Amino acid sequence: MSEAVVWLTIFVLSVFVGIEVISKVSSTLHTPLMSGANAIHGIILLGAIIVTGAAESTGAVVVGLVAVVLAAVNMVGGFVVTDRMLQMFTRKKKKAPAESSAA
Amino acid sequence: MTPTWVQLAYLACAVCFILALKGLSGPKTARYGNLVGALAAVVAVTIPFFYLDLDHVALILVAILIGTAGGVVGARKVQMTQMPQMVALFNGVGGGAAALVALLELADIVGTGEDVGWFVLLATAFTIAVGAVSFAGSIVTFAKLQELMTSAPVVFPGLPIIFGAGMLATIGLTAITLGAPVLWVGVVLGLVGLVVGVLLVLPVGGADVPIVISLLNAFTGLTVAASGYVLENTLLLVAGTLVGASGTFLTMLMANAMGRSVTNILFGALKGGSTLGGGEASDRPVRSAQPNDVAIMLGYADRVIIVPGYGLAVAQAQHALRELVDVLGERDIQVDYAIHPVAGRMPGHMNVLLAEAQVPYEQLKEMSEINGDFKDADVVLIVGANDVVNPAAKTTPGAPIYGMPILNADEAKQIIFMKRSMRPGFAGIENELLFDEKTTLLFGDAKDSMSKLLNAVKAL
């Protein structure tokens, strides 16, 4: 099997997994799911780190660092805001324990 | 070659992302799913520091810190009502990062003069163009939702032609890159992508913007997958593809919930088929009332249904509303909240906002659950909502919201609208229900009116 076919196989299988895992989501969770998926593609940070670490010219390093900053905003911000949203859903189940202090 | 342990670590992270998405699609496991995803992402980005001989490590770490700080502050500071645009912004910067990574990769390919094969070049060009589209498109959606610009569809005469030219230019520049990669062609490709991104989102009406966010989210996912192929990184490929596929599917689910097709949302305004109200306030006669009158209508009802909308959240009136419902409950009145799937600005947004105000989950009824109950309701109280009860969705073919499933508020015995003004809703069309003879309007800021109403009900 040539290497390109291996990549294609991974890609096609991932498409099916991606659709399958979210196929039963209720409309209540559409927003957090979108936000969570958004955070996951922040993993481009990994790519940004790799290319910046290999960059040679100053221009390339600068562009790479901008990419790192943007990707980190996407990844970290995405997960934090999703957690904040989901916190709203879980808090009400145990609303007895005093008013939450986190705002 | 990438060491085996790295490959295995990436595999483990990829599995975690699958579990994260799986978790996020169920209410009980959602938060756990998100944490699993976050953990995997953090582990994954530390890996290259261990196996690659990276230069500029200090600078990279500083850049990560800056980005992390920005992300955390943005995510923590944002009001829950403004969250959709925050997600759009996070998505946009991700797309921008992917485009920049691809540009650097192109520079590297040009610099070394290595023959990488046409498919790698195609993936690189794809990432540059689509990443730029996602970046620019997300910025425009942000501006629309933040109301930095009009939320109505923006169409100008030459738009379809410029858009078409942009698409052709994208294809042409990609073809040039496949033939012989040149850096400046890649840069121009990115710039054209920015223009296409702006033009793609401008004609989309405000109410449809969330669907566009979801679509651009899927786009960014696909660019990350393409970067994974170019960088020979399996984790990027798998994670990007997962997001691309699930994002595309989610976009279709959302569009279905609004009774729209994705192509109609993107290109409907270009066809000129939609009738736009232009956001003008109407001067037709309506019946308005004072909080005391409304309090009596509510206080002596047996069954009340509340339809909350984005206006409620903007005015931060959800806490006062919950108090009002509690007081009505003490008078043995059955009260439920009818939640339209797209109430707020995104599917599920209203649930988040009401959960923040500690409204018990059991009182939140989904549309399909409650739509049969409106005919038995004595009073339906519509707070800051408009489009989701607009009968035009059923009766006026050609209206931007035509075909969207709506809440049957018009079937209730009495209808109360709490509104700031007669301005139309986000979709920009007039609501016939406001002029119905069963309808009473209570004008004013939702929070202010709500506390007056609360006091009036308490005084009964």
Image (cartoon, rainbow, N blue to C red):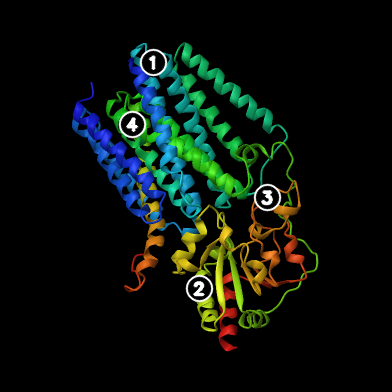
Task: Tell me the mark number nearer the camera, choosing from 2 and 4.
Answer: 2
Q: Amino acid at mark 3?
A: Ile
Q: Residues under labels 1 and 2: Cα distance?
A: 62 Å
**Dot 2 lies on which element?**
helix
Residue receiving disc 1: B110
The kind of residue tagged 2 is Arg
Q: What is the spatial separation of the Cα atoms under label 2 and label 4, in whole angstroms?
A: 47 Å
Residue at 38 percent across and 20 percent down: it is B107
First-in-chain label (1 vs 2): 1
Task: Pick the residue in front: B17 or A67.
Answer: B17
| Label 2–label 4 contact, CB within 8 A | no
Q: Work out which quarter of the rendered image holds the N terminus of chain B and state it.
A: top left
> How would you rate the neighbour count of disc 3 (Cα within 10 Å): few for under 14, some for 14-19, many for 20 or more?
many
Dot 4 falls on a residue whose secondary structure is helix
For the residues bearing labels 3 and 2, Cβ distance under 8 angstroms:
no
Q: Chain of mark 4?
A: A
- Residue linked to disc 2: B322
Q: Quadrant of the C terminus of chain B?
A: bottom right
In this figure, which residue is indicated by the disc labeled 4? A47
Any part of residue B141 in sight: no
Vertical relation: B342 (above or below) B459: above
Distance from Cα at disc 3 to Cα at disc 2: 29 Å
Mark 2 residue crowding within 10 angstroms, few (<14) / some (14–19) / many (20+) = some
Eye-nearest disc, 4 or 1: 4
